[in-house]
Image (cartoon, rainbow, N blue to C red):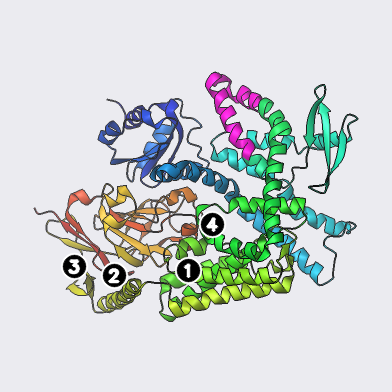
Amino acid sequence: MASLQSEILKNVGGVENVGFLTHCATRLRFTLNDVSKANIDKLDSIDGVLGVVPQGNTGVQVVIGGGVSSVYDAIMHEPGMAGRGESDGASDADIKAAARAKAKGKSAIIDAFFEYLSDSFRPLLGVLLGASLFITIAAIFDAIGYVDFRAADKGATWVFIDTMWRSVFYFLPMMVAYNAAKKLRIDPWVGFAVMAAVMTPEFSKLTEAVTTTCVENKTLLAEQCTAHVFGGLPLQLNGYGGQVFVPLIMVAILALVYRGFQKVIPSSLHMVFVPFLSMAVMIPMTAFLIGPLGIWLGNGLGVGLAWLNGNAPIVFAIIIPLLYPFLVPLGLHWPLNALMLVNINTLGYDFIQGPMGAWNFACFGATAGVLFISSREKDKQMRQVSLGALTAGLLGGISEPSLYGIHLRYKRIYPLMLVGCGVGGLIVGIGGGIKANAFVFTSLLTFPVFNPMALYLIAITVAFFTAMLLVIFMDYRTPEQRAAAAQAREDMKLAETAKASGAVVAGTATAVATAPVKTALEAGVTTLIDAPVQGRALELSEIPDPVFAGGKMGQGVGVDPSGNEVVAPAAGTVVVMPESGHAVGLKLDNGVELLIHVGIDTVSMNGESFEVLVSKGDRVEVGTPLLRFDRVAIEAAGFSPITAVLVTNSKKFASVEGPLADSAALNVPLLKVTAKSA
């Protein structure tokens, strides 16, 4: 009889069809080279497989349950699987992207294009933000006259400080090339090496070659040199530091070349000859064609926007902040960010970031309005979300927590926020525009790089308070949502009252007496299970995941969390505790086996924003903290924070009922488990 692991591998198309294999707390996550080779029906019928979920056109999830890690280990020890399980964290993202592309039908190509842009830049947010703070500090010293930030003869100390941020922007093309290649699932170091070739000192020295000629380019106000190589072929020499269009175009073509060589070269020779031939083709192509094309494309777009800014500055200053609220959620803002870098490289300043600041601060102002309302109404969940998002915005210039955590959930905010965007942009336009001498994140810490500084501060202040006051006075929720929030607050009070009186809340306000806790599997016994996390209770079918919602992992409920901690609802033992910290499995002393899975697809966060507080095998008591999580960060990463609370051995019971209340509160029963009759 074939083993479970061999049966699974056979029906996903064999080892050679597996690109990547990862797993979370319950599922094997396959990224396949050809998803059509997977036999979904046979996979679903394998004894030991609880369910199968196809993921777009790139992969499949095989639901195993609590023993998934041992199955994963067994598969990874199968011949030929070595190296296929070293996930770089992108496989889950690729699965999600493919699923979204499939759902969007005709826009799949456009969607994939902008995901390519977004994923090429997103991993660099941290170092870009860090570099921008160096620039901000230097700009502050420049503003108070302590040092001339732009002087050519700065002292050695300031030259060294410059290297601390210039490294990020100068080598940005190689970083983008690495990420872009990783996104397209080819060797990222090949992409890095191709881009690095045209940034080496040797390439720069070609300007000094005897056969090199230089002329003054009046359009770009710069000297343009052309070297003659390989017997006279003209090679346009460019400085590629800070360029982003070039690596994005180059890697897209490299992916085709790389995969082409993979098809025609025997797999035993891939390691040496695929990188070698790819570099042999792409380095000359980048130097002779893609590099000059990318630079002229970026410069052309920059010149076009500069023309609009110069000829209709008020229109330009209003359009930019009004566009950003729609561009950022779709990832369409990355091309404009790329243009900012092009402007700084070619003009010495950027004119987009100033009006963009009006959008950012209108966004943060709307979030501040939500924080005010949630604080006034003592809405702990929204207060936590809005406070975290506002802090990330004001100090880091990052709008995604506000957008994904609040604004896209409450569409009423958008028209109110757009008023703030428009007013702020109008002030920028009337004032004649704003220039930034460096690429920065528009936060409270970066205002010194903008000129005129006073105009910028006025514009962002007005944008912020306009959006904030509109949200406060007009609310961010529809009348129905306000009524639902009021009911949730009332339900919470009822739950607290019921707990204090020794009862539980059923439905919205019906109290039932607690029963003595016996062994849950004892015939006829009814066992109540407390909520392990607080928040808004959901029906199982409302969990946005087909495996959980369909009961394939067991019956239970969902919780839209307002707290940030998962606790043990009863005494028992930890049987599942992955390093990623996104889920925990318990075997309670009463015989109930429980899985608490925080968020949907959060395994791909690789433990970021999760804190593991216990280990597998640990003994826990009622209320023992199991893990902590950051809801704001989960939503900012694009994942749902909805938590599944499942009885994984549901089949041993006559029924699993819940939720017992609209609100989940710690130490208050959430589920009722009834044993089978004798």
Secondary-structure class at tag 4: helix
Give the extent of the magenta segment: 249-278
Q: CA distance from mark 4 to mark 3?
A: 54 Å
Q: Which residue is mark 1?
A: 415
Q: Secondary structure at mark 3?
A: loop
Q: Tell me the kind of residue under disc 3.
A: Pro
Measured from the top left, where is residue 564 in percent x and y?
43, 65
Q: How many marks?
A: 4
- Residue at position x 78%, y 37% in the image: 200
Residue 645, relative to residue 460: is it above or below?
above
Q: Is residue 275 magenta?
A: yes
Disc on the earlier residue, 4 or 2? 4
Tell me if residue 377 comes above or below residue 515 in the rendering: below
Numbered badge on residue 328:
4
User: Residues at badges 4 and 2 in contact (C-beta under 8 Å)?
Assistant: no
Identity of the residue drawn at 84% across and 71% down:
145
Residue at the disc numbered 2? 668
